[in-house]
Image (tube, coloured by chain):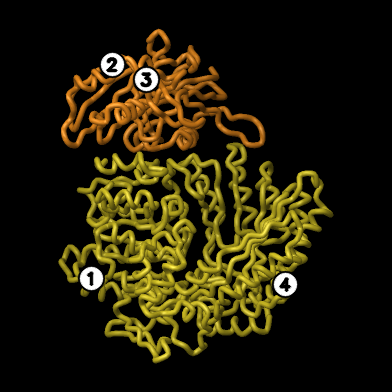
C-alpha cells in the first residue's frame, strides 16, 4: 500500500473553496486526522496529493477523486470517517481504496445542472431541441486566448425535468480532450439561443466514466 | 444559503471568504443562546482572520454557553457593490443572518484608516451611523482595540468604547447588556450603568469644549462621568482564555499559521511607539503554558507553521526554553517555527539559526533611524555595531536578504540623519561583501521608509508631523544617496501618512470628517486600491477643518488632548519626561535595567509585579 485514492463530496459552502485552496485544506485535514501522508523530498517538502479532475469554484460534486500517498499501512475502511470528523463543512469523504486505474483513463462526466428562470421556464422541448442540434459551436476563453469549441458530440445523453424555479438538466460531457466545463452549456444558450438563457445556473458533478462508459473509480 | 447570495458568489473574487463553514468555526443553536454578538472587523477576511485579538475574543465570548459570537468582515469592493445591488444586508459568516438583527455589534479597531469602513459596515447592516440616531437599546454598537485609545474620532458612532484588553471587559459589558435587555431598560439607563464598569468609555458623557483657535479647552465631564477611564488588562496570562482550537481558514489569509502568544507589553520604551506604552504593564506566560498551548493548537489545526508573538520576542526571559519545548514537538512533524520581532543581537541570531534550518530567506530589522544620535533621540537601543555584527552572522549563516525599516520625519531629524540611512545600508552591503560565503548568489538589501506619525499615548504625542513636502524632500535626498545596485529603496506615500496622522490625534470633529469621507465613498482606506487623498481633503473641507491642524501642528504640553480622559496606565509625566530626554538625545534604560516608575504596574493587583 502506497498510492491511495479517496472519493469525496464537495458541496454547500465547500463548493466555493478553489482548487488550489482545497489542496491546502485537505492537507490539513490529513494532518489533523494523523494520516501518515507521504511528502515530496527537497528543500520545500509538500504533501503528495493530486485531484484527478479539478473542479470549478462554485460547482458541487458527489464524485471527486483524489490521489495521495502514505508512508505506512493504514485502515482504509475507517479513514473516510476519521477524515470527516476533522473536515470543514461541505467536504465529505466517502470511500478510500487502492486505485486500479490511472486518472488519465477518465473520459466522460455525468453532471446535473439547475437552470433557474425567474420569469417562467421555457418549454423543456425547446431546450431538448437546442441541445440536439447538429452543431453547437461555443466561443470560450482559455489561457491560450479565445477559441471555438464544438459542443455537439462532446455533450450528450441529455435529460430534462421541471424543477422549482426552472429546469433540471442531466447530461454527459467530455471530461478530457476536450475538457468541457458544464458551464459552457449555458454559454451556448447565451450565444446561440438567448431566448432560452437562464437567469442563473448551478452545477453538480455526479459520476466520472471511462471511454467505454464504465464508471471510473 | 440565500438565493441572491448564491447567485453573486460565483461572480466575485475569492468567494470562499464570504461563506464561513471553516473547520473549528463555532456554530450554536439560535434557540439555545440568549445573546447574539456580531464581532465586526473593519477590513477583509484575510486581514481580520490573521488578527490574534479577534481570535482570542471570538473564542472567549463563545466559551460562554448562552452567548453566540459570530464573525463579520468587510466585503471587498466587488462583493460590497454586488450586495448593495441585490439588497443583501451585511451578514455574519456562521449563521448567514443579517447583522442588523443581532443584539450586539462589537467592532475591533486596530488602525485609524479602518474608521470609514466601520461606517460602511453599519450602513450595509442597515443601521443608522450615529449612536444618537439609534434610539433603541438593541442593537448595542461598541468598539475596542488600540485604534480607539484615542476614542474621540469615532465617538459619534459608538454607544460605548471598551478600553484595553477585552477578555474580561467584553463579557462584563455583554452580561450587563443582557440584563438590561431582559429587564427592558432604556438605552440611556443601560449606558449610564455600563459607564460604571471599569474600562468603559462613554462618549456621550464627555462634552468637548473648544477654544477660539480650534484647540480643545476641555473634555467636560457630564453627570455620571468618571474623571478618567482606565484601560483594562488581563492580570494573569496563564489563567486567561487562549484559543487552542482556532478556526482554520479554507482560503488563503495573510498570516495562515498557529499563533502562540509569549507576553504582553514591551520593556523597551521606544519613544515613537504607541504599542510600547499602551500595552503595559509587562505580563508573561509561563513556558509550560506556551508550549502546551502551541502543541494543542498545532494538533487542532493541522497548521504546518507556528509563530511566537509579542512586541519584542528577544525580551521574553525564557525564550530558549520555549523554543526547545516547541521544537521537540515541531521538528519531527515538519512544523516550522517562526520568531518575528527579534532584536538585532547575537542571541537572536543564534536562535534564528536554530529555527530556520533550511529555508533561509530574508531577515528584517527596524533600526528606525540612520544615525546613532537619532536612534538615541527615539530611545531605540540598537547600535550600528550590534546591527552590523548581526548582519555578519546572518550572511555567514547563509541568509542573503536583509530588509531594513526606517522612519523619516522623526523629531529633530536633520539631513545628516537622512543620509545616514543610506550610509548604514552601504555598511550592511560591505559586511555582506566581506563575510558572505556565497557571493555568487548575490544579496538583496531593502531599505523601506515610512513617514513618522505621532501617536496618542506615546512620548511623541505632542510632536508635529513633518509636512508632506518636507517628507518628499527627505525621500528624494535619501534616494539620491542610495547608489548601490543591490540596495533597493521603497518609501511609503506621503498623503496616506498625512491623513493617518490627522485621524490619529483627531478630536470629535474629526468624526464628522470621517462621516463626510464615507459619504463621498471612502471605505477600506488602508488599501491603496481604495485610498483617495483628494476625497479626504474634500471631506475635511466639508466640515470646515484643516487636516494640517491635526497632523503637522505641535501641541502645547499644557494643551487639552482629545484622549485626556483615557488612562492607558502610563503617567503623562513619564511621557513628558521621555519627550524632554529625546531632545537631549538621552537614553532611558529599558524596564529590566531600571524601572521608570511609569505607573502601569498599578494596573496589576497588589503583590503582583510587572515583568519589566
Tell me where residue A21 appears, x and y as whole percent: 46, 37
Tell me: B63 left or right of B29: right
Q: Quadrant of the N terminus of chain B?
A: top left
* Distance in Å between CA atoms under marks 2 and 3: 10 Å
Question: What residue sits right under mark 3 in the picture?
Answer: A151
Do marks 2 and 4 share a subunit?
Answer: no
* Distance in Å between CA atoms under marks 1 and 2: 61 Å
The chain to which mark 3 is attached is A
Secondary structure under badge 4?
Answer: loop
Question: What residue sits right under mark 4 in the picture?
Answer: B371
Report which colour depicts chain A. Answer: orange
Q: How many marks?
A: 4
Name the one closer to the observer, B212 or A192: A192
Question: What residue sits right under mark 2 in the picture?
Answer: A132
Labels 2, 4: front one: 2
Do marks 4 and 3 share a subunit?
Answer: no
Do marks 1 and 4 share a subunit?
Answer: yes
Amino acid at each position: 500500500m502506497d498510492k491511495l485514492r479517496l472519493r469525496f463530496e464537495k458541496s454547500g459552502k465547500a463548493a466555493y473553496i478553489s482548487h488550489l485552496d482545497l489542496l491546502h485544506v485537505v492537507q490539513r485535514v490529513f494532518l489533523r486526522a494523523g494520516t501518515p501522508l507521504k511528502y515530496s523530498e527537497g528543500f520545500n517538502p509538500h504533501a503528495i496529493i493530486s485531484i484527478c479532475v479539478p473542479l470549478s469554484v462554485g460547482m458541487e460534486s458527489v464524485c471527486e477523486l483524489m490521489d495521495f500517498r502514505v508512508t505506512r499501512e493504514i485502515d482504509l475502511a475507517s479513514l473516510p470517517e476519521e477524515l470527516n470528523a476533522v473536515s470543514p463543512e461541505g467536504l465529505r469523504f466517502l470511500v478510500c481504496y487502492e486505485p486500479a486505474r490511472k486518472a488519465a483513463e477518465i473520459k466522460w462526466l455525468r453532471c446535473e445542472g439547475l437552470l433557474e428562470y425567474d420569469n417562467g421556464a421555457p418549454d423543456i422541448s425547446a431546450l431538448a431541441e437546442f441541445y440536439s442540434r447538429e452543431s453547437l459551436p461555443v466561443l470560450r476563453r482559455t489561457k491560450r486566448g479565445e477559441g471555438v469549441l464544438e459542443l455537439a458530440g462532446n455533450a450528450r445523453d441529455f435529460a430534462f425535468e421541471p424543477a422549482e424555479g426552472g429546469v433540471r438538466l442531466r447530461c454527459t460531457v467530455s471530461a478530457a480532450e476536450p475538457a468541457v466545463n458544464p458551464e459552457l452549456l449555458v454559454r451556448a444558450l447565451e450565444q446561440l439561443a438567448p431566448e432560452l438563457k437562464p437567469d442563473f445556473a448551478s452545477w453538480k458533478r455526479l459520476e466520472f466514466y471511462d471511454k467505454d462508459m464504465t464508471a471510473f473509480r | 444559503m440565500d438565493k441572491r447570495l448564491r447567485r453573486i458568489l460565483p461572480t466575485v473574487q475569492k468567494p470562499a471568504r464570504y461563506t464561513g463553514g471553516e473547520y473549528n468555526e463555532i456554530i450554536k443553536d439560535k434557540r439555545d443562546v440568549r445573546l447574539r454578538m456580531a464581532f465586526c472587523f473593519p477590513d477583509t477576511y484575510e486581514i481580520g482572520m490573521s488578527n490574534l485579538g479577534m481570535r482570542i475574543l471570538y473564542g472567549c465570548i463563545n466559551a460562554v454557553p448562552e452567548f453566540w459570537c459570530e464573525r463579520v468582515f468587510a466585503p471587498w469592493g466587488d462583493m460590497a457593490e454586488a450586495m448593495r445591488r441585490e439588497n443583501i444586508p451585511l451578514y455574519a459568516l456562521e449563521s448567514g443572518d443579517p447583522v442588523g438583527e443581532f443584539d450586539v455589534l462589537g467592532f475591533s479597531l486596530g488602525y485609524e484608516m479602518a474608521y470609514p469602513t466601520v461606517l460602511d459596515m453599519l450602513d450595509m447592516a442597515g443601521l443608522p451611523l450615529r449612536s444618537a440616531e439609534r434610539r433603541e437599546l438593541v442593537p448595542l454598537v461598541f468598539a475596542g482595540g488600540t485604534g480607539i485609545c484615542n476614542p474621540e474620532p469615532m465617538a459619534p458612532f459608538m454607544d460605548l468604547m471598551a478600553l484595553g484588553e477585552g477578555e474580561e471587559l467584553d463579557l462584563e459589558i455583554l452580561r450587563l447588556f443582557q440584563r438590561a435587555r431582559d429587564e427592558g431598560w432604556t438605552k440611556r439607563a443601560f449606558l449610564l450603568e455600563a459607564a460604571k464598569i471599569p474600562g468603559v468609555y462613554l462618549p456621550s458623557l464627555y462634552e468637548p469644549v473648544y477654544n477660539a483657535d480650534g484647540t480643545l479647552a476641555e473634555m467636560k465631564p457630564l453627570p455620571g462621568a468618571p474623571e478618567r477611564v482606565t484601560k483594562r488588562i488581563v492580570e494573569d496570562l496563564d489563567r486567561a482564555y487562549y484559543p487552542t482550537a482556532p478556526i482554520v481558514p479554507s482560503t488563503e489569509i495573510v498570516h495562515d499559521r498557529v499563533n502562540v502568544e509569549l507576553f504582553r507589553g514591551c520593556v523597551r520604551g521606544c519613544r515613537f511607539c504607541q504599542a510600547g506604552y499602551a500595552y503595559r504593564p509587562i505580563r508573561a506566560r509561563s513556558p509550560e503554558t506556551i508550549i502546551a498551548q502551541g502543541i494543542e493548537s498545532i494538533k487542532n489545526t493541522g497548521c504546518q507553521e507556528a509563530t511566537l508573538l509579542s512586541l519584542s520576542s528577544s525580551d521574553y526571559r525564557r525564550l530558549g526554553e520555549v523554543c526547545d519545548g516547541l521544537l521537540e514537538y515541531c521538528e519531527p512533524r515538519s512544523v516550522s517555527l517562526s520568531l518575528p520581532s527579534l532584536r538585532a543581537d547575537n542571541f537572536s541570531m543564534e536562535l534564528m539559526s536554530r529555527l530556520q534550518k533550511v529555508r533561509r530567506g530574508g531577515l528584517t530589522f527596524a533600526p528606525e533611524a540612520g544615525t546613532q544620535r537619532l536612534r538615541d533621540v527615539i530611545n531605540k537601543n540598537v547600535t550600528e555595531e550590534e546591527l552590523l555584527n548581526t548582519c555578519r552572522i546572518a550572511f555567514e549563516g547563509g541568509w542573503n536578504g536583509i530588509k531594513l525599516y526606517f522612519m523619516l520625519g522623526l523629531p529633530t531629524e536633520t539631513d545628516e540623519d537622512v543620509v545616514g540611512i543610506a550610509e548604514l545600508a552601504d555598511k550592511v552591503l560591505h559586511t555582506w561583501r566581506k563575510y558572505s560565503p556565497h557571493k555568487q548568489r548575490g544579496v538583496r538589501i531593502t531599505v523601506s521608509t515610512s513617514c513618522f506619525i505621532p501617536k496618542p499615548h506615546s512620548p511623541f504625542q505632542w510632536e508635529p508631523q513633518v509636512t508632506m513636502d518636507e517628507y518628499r524632500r527627505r525621500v528624494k535626498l535619501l534616494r539620491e544617496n542610495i547608489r548601490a545596485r543591490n540596495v533597493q529603496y521603497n518609501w511609503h506615500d506621503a498623503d496616506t501618512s498625512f491623513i493617518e496622522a490627522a485621524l490619529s490625534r483627531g478630536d470629535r470633529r474629526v468624526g464628522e470628517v470621517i462621516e463626510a469621507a464615507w459619504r463621498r465613498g471612502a471605505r477600506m482606506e488602508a488599501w491603496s486600491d481604495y485610498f483617495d487623498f483628494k476625497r479626504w481633503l474634500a471631506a475635511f473641507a466639508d466640515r470646515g477643518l484643516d487636516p494640517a491642524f491635526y497632523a503637522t501642528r505641535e501641541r502645547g504640553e499644557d494643551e487639552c488632548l482629545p484622549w485626556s480622559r483615557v488612562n492607558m496606565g502610563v503617567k503623562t509625566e513619564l511621557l513628558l519626561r521621555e519627550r524632554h530626554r529625546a531632545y537631549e538625545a538621552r537614553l532611558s534604560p529599558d524596564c529590566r535595567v531600571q524601572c521608570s516608575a511609569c505607573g502601569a504596574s498599578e494596573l496589576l493587583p497588589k503583590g503582583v509585579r510587572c515583568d519589566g
